[in-house]
Image (cartoon, rainbow, N blue to C red):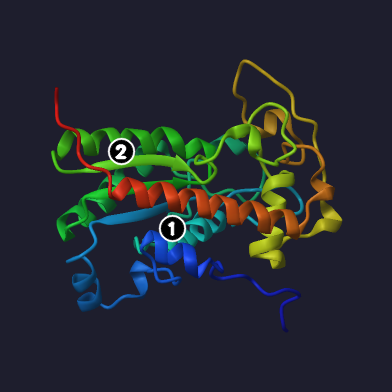
Amino acid sequence: MSPRFERLYSPVVSAELAAELGGTGEPIQWERLTARECESMLENVDSVLIPLGATEQHGPHLGLCVDGEIAHHVCLGVSALTGVPVVPPLVYGVSGSHGTLPGTLTLRPETMIAMLEDITDSLYALGVRQFVFVNAHTWNAGPMEVVADKLRVKYDDVRVRCIFYVTCYPGPEVDGRVTYGRGLMHANYFETSLMLHIDPEVVHMDRAESLEDRDTFWDYRTDQVSRSGVWGRDVEQATEENGAREMERCIRTTAKAVAAAIAEPWPTPR
């Protein structure tokens, strides 16, 4: 049976911007290189993008793959624009906070830390010295930052930065229909729009539900605040056009930041 929609496997990027930032317009996917191709690439490139996502419930209308696909898609676009390779995404996340909502597969924070340490140690042994973690799932942030700190302590010649895929432009500019900040969004208008753009096959708009977001001091498990697993309003109004516009901005701003970062001189202690 043919799919209802076509998945956008690789982002379409500006050839002019790619020429400016050092890319070819096509992403460099680590796992698709041969061993010799990887060895040759690393003679000229010492940076890498590491996408982090999750496999977890995203309400009644989205597939479980949302966070992994978004993180990977952004990294593919950034790679196409900058020439920085992207390793396979980590599609299991620290997702225990979804509680009893069905479908979620989760790692313990300690497990994610160990996995990222092993991955980055392997990359270091091959010659990688600059690591950019690109995250699409809020609760991955703690383990990710722990690994970044351990890398900085362990190696004198490593630079590492942890970002979310929407980090590189101001929070108020995020068109997410979220009142209380970019962190409080799950299966919402923003994520639904992005998925309508990159993988509409896993979006079922006839099942979409919304939930008005509220400000709280405490963080809660998702199942403690939402029966549907959705956190955010106006989900039914999500569009592919908005998703395409926001994804292009995520990729473009992140690529510009990464290109500048890999060329940044090391500081001289004063």
The answer to the question of whether label 1 and label 2 lie on touching residues, with beta carbons closer than 8 A, is no
What's the CA distance linking mark 1 and mark 2? 16 Å
Give x and y (percent) for residue 108. Answer: 42, 39
Q: Which mark is residue 1?
A: none
- In the image, 218 versus 29, the foreground residue is 29
Q: Is residue 42 left or right of residue 26?
A: left
Rendered view: 173 above or below 219: below
Q: Amino acid at mark 2?
A: Val
User: Could one spot residue 115 in this view of the protein?
Assistant: no
Q: Quadrant of residue 47?
A: bottom left
Rendered view: 139 above or below 220: below
Mark 1: few, some, or many residues within 10 Å (few <14, many ≥20)?
many
* Disc on the earlier residue, 1 or 2: 1
Outermost residue, bottom side: 1
Outermost residue, top side: 217
Give x and y (percent) for residue 72. Answer: 49, 58
Q: Residue at x 44, y 72 (%)?
A: 26
Q: Quadrant of residue 89?
A: bottom left
> Which residue, given by chain and number where applicable, does mark 1 sit on?
89
Give x and y (percent) for residue 198. Answer: 64, 63
Q: Residue at x 75, y 38 (%)?
A: 177
> Which residue, given by chain and number where applicable, does mark 2 sit on?
147
Q: Amino acid at mark 1?
A: Pro
Q: Is residue 37 left or right of residue 91?
A: left
User: Could one spot residue 59 in this view of the protein?
Assistant: yes
Q: Residue at x 84, y 49 (%)?
A: 236
Q: Residue at x 14, y 26 (%)?
A: 269
**Quadrant where the N terminus lies?**
bottom right
Rendered view: 80 above or below 103: below
Which element carries disc 2, helix, strand or loop?
helix
